[in-house]
Image: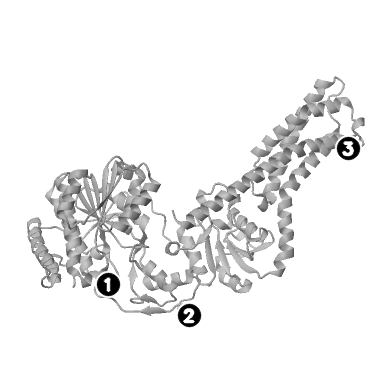
């Protein structure tokens, strides 16, 4: 668990404890005030002299007083008077108080009348003034306790805020979540921040106000309002916004140079009255992509993984570790992590032990290039499903070390696929890349050879179902542009982009992995599954957005430097080769590329030649690869 999430949980825990204390105080206060209200009503009725109160009335009051206070507190509870956050008390809370008082008043009339009839045959009811004054004082006492805190904060704000520097805030969203944020910022003294205007696309709300703050218009007014009110921060609180709508709003907001905060996962928040500024998070680059939520069939994935021995090669890497996280949630019989990098393997091991103590977890160090080590592992643990994520993936580095790319990617895949076949593995899923399509670099060509290896094993038949899953770049993975850009921004720039027009497909790591698991459940043998990555993104735009999200201005605060395409780098990536067709699956984000016919015997002969060239480190291995991957343009 990260430090940030731990801090957030502590804040929420303290907030919950504070709420419990307040609720207990109100409960005790109500038990006293409810009795006092009707006692005072009786006292006033008889000229403020206890000795003047007729005995039947006094007996009836004493008989019903304790019972009434308990019943009234229960009524208050069911009306939500112990769940509200009274520092935000408003008209909604007043409605609850009125409802609670009216219901308890009905209880009072019925109960006290019964008590009067029990103590006297002559008196069938209490005086009218008793009921009227009792109700009014009960309402007054209930209102006073719950609204006094807010009135104190309003007084404090008016007398203190004028002497301090104010940071103007814009809130986008005039719903209940937005109102909660506004009230906390303006009435709880949240630093020197003050909400000065509200944006909402609902025209019926325009020219109205919330707590005196004007709703000035829709998203078209954001830029003008920022200039007019000198806005420094924008808080976005729109639970109903789709990812596409949120992308449009953020697209405008990021041009304002204001600090941006976003209220996330509001569908998980049961009581919006308890939303606070602490629930606002920084806007991420994923938010700016505006992708619709990825949906997978959890039942299919569960059935394909539950109760099985699962092995993930490269399990400590960005994709491999997320595969392990998601597999661990589906109750496998055993999860085997296989990785050459011990630090990465250790990190994911400790994380899974903490999050899933019930999981049978085995972490093994080894290389997929070592056939002997793989045979030992497969023979001992007999994995039923293998996700092969171990690979060299950095394009520029592999251009400098092409033999290593072939050794690790191609023959590492071959070794693992061979062991899967030999030891009766049910399913083997290769993690591939869109760089395998019409490759212009040795890394992409090596991954295309990996796909051909998988197709070759599938064509040979057997009990193992072989498949490959192909997708583009994943945000935040090791070596991806986003961590690099953030590091460059933190250092003051410049941010390096290879070409102003270069584009790439992007997906978050959890999204990609969930689709990999879904695709794996569809595997029948030899398929190349292609994930729908959405619309491509210009890397230059990505860099500029990251600079703006850091509160800086591109080309002013942080320079952007264009370094030129690197060896083997494309201007754009493709997901399918011209020769491949496209078939659909039950999940519209997963497609199947029609396999290209492979001469298995010829391909195996070529693999032997390639293996000799790779391990002998002789000659230009690119020529040998080009003879096998006809679409490779070295």
Mark yes or no: residue 587 visible. no
Question: Which quadrant would the C terminus be assigned to in this image?
Answer: bottom left
Secondary element at image label 3 = helix
Q: Is residue 136 above or below residue 534?
A: above
Residue 241, x across and y down, in percent:
50, 57
Secondary element at image label 2 = loop
Q: Are marks 3 and 1 in contact (CB under 8 Å)?
A: no
Q: Nearer the viewer, residue 198 or 409?
A: 409
**Which sits earlier in the primary sequence, circle 3 or circle 1?**
3
Q: Give the quadrant of residue 116.
A: top right
Q: Which residue is mark 2?
A: 556
Q: Which residue is mark 3?
A: 44
Name the mark on residue 570.
1
Give me the C-alpha separation between circle 1 and circle 2.
29 Å
Q: Give the quadrant of residue 157.
A: bottom right
In the image, is 219 to the left or to the right of 505? right
**Which sits earlier in the primary sequence, circle 3 or circle 2?**
3
Residue 503, x across and y down, in percent:
34, 70
């Amino acid at each position: 668990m990260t430090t940030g999430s731990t801090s957030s949980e502590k804040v929420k825990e303290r907030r919950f404890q504070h709420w419990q204390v307040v609720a207990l105080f109100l409960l005790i206060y109500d038990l006293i005030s409810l009795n006092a209200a009707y006692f005072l009503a009786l006292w006033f009725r008889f000229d403020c002299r206890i000795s003047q109160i007729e005995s039947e009335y006094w007996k009836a009051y004493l008989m019903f007083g304790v019972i009434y206070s308990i019943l009234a507190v229960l009524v208050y509870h069911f009306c939500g008077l112990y769940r509200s956050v009274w520092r935000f008390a408003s008209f909604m809370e007043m409605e609850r108080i009125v409802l609670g008082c009216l219901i308890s008043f009905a209880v009072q009339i019925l109960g006290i009348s019964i008590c009067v009839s029990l103590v006297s045959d002559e008196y069938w009811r209490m005086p009218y003034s008793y009921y009227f004054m009792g109700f009014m004082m009960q309402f007054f006492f209930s209102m006073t306790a719950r609204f006094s805190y807010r009135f104190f904060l309003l007084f404090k704000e008016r007398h203190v805020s004028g002497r301090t520097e104010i940071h103007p805030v814009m809130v986008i969203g005039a719903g209940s979540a937005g109102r909660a944020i506004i009230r906390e910022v303006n009435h709880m003294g949240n630093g020197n921040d003050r909400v000065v205007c509200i944006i909402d696309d609902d025209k019926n709300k325009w020219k109205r106000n919330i707590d005196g703050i004007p709703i000035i218009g829709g998203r078209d007014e954001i830029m003008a309002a920022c200039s007019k009110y000198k806005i420094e921060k924008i808080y976005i609180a729109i639970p109903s916004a789709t990812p596409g709508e949120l992308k449009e709003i953020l697209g405008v907001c990021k041009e304002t140079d204001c600090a941006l905060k976003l209220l996330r996962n509001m569908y998980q928040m049961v009581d919006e009255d308890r939303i606070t500024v602490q629930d606002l998070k920084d806007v991420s680059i994923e938010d700016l992509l505006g992708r619709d939520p990825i949906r997978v069939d959890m039942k299919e994935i569960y059935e394909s993984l539950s109760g099985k021995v699962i092995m993930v090669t490269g399990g400590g890497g960005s994709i491999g570790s997320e595969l392990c996280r998601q597999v661990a949630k589906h109750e496998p019989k055993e999860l085997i992590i296989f990785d050459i990098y011990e630090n990465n393997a250790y990190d994911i091991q400790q994380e899974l032990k903490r999050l899933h103590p019930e999981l049978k977890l085995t972490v093994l160090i080894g290389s997929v290039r070592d056939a002997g080590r793989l045979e030992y592992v497969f023979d001992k643990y007999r994995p039923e499903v293998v996700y092969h994520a171990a690979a060299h993936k950095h394009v520029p580095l592999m251009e400098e070390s092409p033999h290593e790319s072939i050794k690790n990617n191609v023959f590492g895949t071959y070794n693992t696929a061979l062991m899967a076949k030999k030891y009766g593995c049910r399913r083997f899923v290769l993690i591939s890349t869109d760089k395998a399509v019409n490759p212009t670099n040795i890394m992409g060509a090596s991954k295309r050879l990996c796909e051909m290896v998988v197709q070759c094993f599938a064509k040979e038949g057997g009990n193992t179902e072989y498949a490959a899953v192909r997708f583009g770049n994943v945000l935040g993975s090791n070596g991806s542009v986003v961590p690099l850009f953030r590091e460059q921004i933190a250092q003051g720039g410049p941010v390096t982009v290879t070409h102003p027009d270069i584009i790439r497909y992007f997906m978050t790591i959890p999204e990609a992995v969930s689709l990999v698991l879904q695709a794996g459940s569809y595997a029948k043998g030899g398929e190349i599954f292609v994930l729908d990555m959405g619309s491509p993104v210009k890397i230059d735009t990505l860099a500029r957005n990251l600079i703006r999200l850091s509160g800086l201005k591109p080309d002013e605060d942080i320079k952007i430097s264009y370094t030129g395409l690197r060896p083997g780098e494309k201007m754009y990536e493709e997901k399918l080769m011209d020769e491949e067709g496209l078939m659909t699956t039950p999940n519209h984000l997963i497609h199947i590329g029609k396999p290209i016919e492979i001469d298995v015997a010829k391909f195996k002969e070529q693999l032997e030649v390639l293996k000799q060239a790779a391990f002998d480190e002789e000659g230009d291995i690119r020529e040998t690869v080009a003879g096998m991957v006809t679409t490779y343009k070295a």
